[in-house]
Image: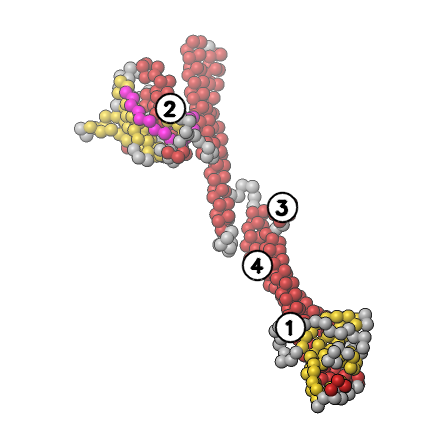
Amino acid sequence: MNRLSHWWQAHSLRSQLMIGILVPVLLLVLVNSGVLYRQALRAADTAYDRTLLATAKSIGEQLEMVGQGEQARVRATLPYSALEPFEADNRSRLYYRVSGFEGEMVSGFDDLPLWRGELPTKSLYAALVDFYDGQYRGEPVRIAVLLQPVSGPGGQGMVTIQVAETLELRQTLARQMLVDTLWRQALLLAVIAGVVVLVVQRATRPVRRLSAALADRSDSDLTPLQASEAPREVRPLVEATNQHMARLAHLLSHQKRFVRDTAHQLRTPLAVLKTQVQSARRGDVDPMLALGEIEHTVNRATELANQMLSLAKVEQLRQQDDAPVLDWATVVRDVALDLAPLIAERQLDFAIATDPAPVRAHEWALRELARNLLHNAIKHIPAAATLDIRLVCDERTAALTIADSGPGIPASLRAHLFEPFARHAQPGALPGGSGLGLAICQEITRSLGGEITLDNRRAHGRTVGLEACVRLPLARPSDEDPTR
């Protein structure tokens, strides 16, 4: 079965269509030819049997009763030459036998075997007649048996008349009917095959055009395929191919942008680092001060590289669909614990409240999302300010809110909040930052099917802080890990 399946799949769609259509049609034609041939044979046998019956009746008309009493007997005055009109084209021979009341030989060929059968209960003829196949003088024959009543002044009785015919004419007619049937069916099959080939060729032409168009494309051409002429059954495949190429185009665009941005962003800290090293070697600045500046530049470059790698990893996770179900609250609390030294250093008034929030996501994505938002808030609010974290759930979503009492975001920066490498430092905030933190948060949120917003908190007509809110869809109960 597997070998047959592999053989079938190895053929082209066009071959499969033609084989799948022509083979059943061929089988149907063969079966139909056999049925037609058998019906024609039955019709021919019926016609020739009627001729045999007419011959037997003609012989019966020539019989007479002679003698009286026990001396009564049947006499036939039929010469064999009288049967010649019934022999067709000298291609078949007729033999007959007439048997008396007791089965005695009356006339004809005495070596023709006497009939010992029974009359059929149902017959097409208004006569006591039976037909059967037999052998006579080494040849196959068709025999008609007619029971003919004969009466006269001396008595009456039932005479048995047998007429046998050789089968040359029937066989010739059968062969002719078979040939006629086969060539007509062959012509019909040839017409069907021609129509099928033309239809299949026309139906698969759009598929071949699509194949040729794909083969002629360059490696970098990921534009959508044109499916206006494609059959309805092929359009889902074309649409799926276009969607796949769109994802590949997005991935390639992201990779190109990543390489371009990496080269551009790392060029500046490396150039600064080179200048600082040269200045230190010349003795332009105090060695300890130079080492401090170099350390600061290295830290900035390291943070930038790590964030760019995080941005690239988000795109990698976006292509995966095997994320587990995790409790977001546990991840947020772990991140807050990791950043506790920074919170204590800034002497922030910190509060956290979380509800259990099962979401489908990779742990790294949830951790990076919470860390970037919380770290961004810690860096950009004044010392001794308030910082609150809340994680609440409704029927469908979980919402993480990080509210601070910092300066907020001016309207001029709102349009560029989530753009990579855009600086969002505010008056009074700590210096530094690569401009990638919020871009990473937005990409992670989008990859998880959620949304992120940053809004100023206002009271008494003035800005009293910033509120970052991330909403993610809750995992369905059927998605949750039963071991958790």
Image point (42%, 20%), residue name: 300
Extent of the magenta region:
351-371
Give the SS element for disc 1.
loop
Q: Is residue 84 left or right of residue 331?
A: right
Q: Earlier in the sequence, mark 4 or mark 3?
A: 3
Q: Which mark is residue 162?
A: none
Give the SS element for disc 4.
helix
Q: Which residue is mark 2?
A: 331
Q: Which residue is mark 1?
A: 120
Q: Amino acid at mark 2?
A: Val
Q: Amino acid at mark 1?
A: Pro
Q: Residues within 10 Å of mark 4 (few under 14, many from 20)?
A: few
- Cα distance, mark 3 to mark 1? 51 Å
Can you give x and y, in whole percent of width and height, for residue 179 in the image?
70, 69
83 versus 321 height, above or below: below
- Cα distance, mark 4 to mark 3? 32 Å
- Cα distance, mark 3 to mark 2? 53 Å
Q: Which residue is mark 4?
A: 202
The magenta stretch spans residue 368: yes
Q: Earlier in the sequence, mark 3 or mark 2?
A: 3
Q: Amino acid at mark 4?
A: Arg
Q: Nearer the viewer, mark 1 or mark 4?
A: 1
Give the SS element for disc 2.
helix
Can you give x and y, in whole percent of width and height, for residue 321 in the image?
46, 34
Which residue of the protein is positioned furthest toward the left in this rendering?
Answer: 460
Q: Nearer the viewer, mark 3 or mark 1?
A: 1
Q: Which residue is more in the foreground, 240 or 360?
A: 360
Q: Earlier in the sequence, mark 2 or mark 4?
A: 4
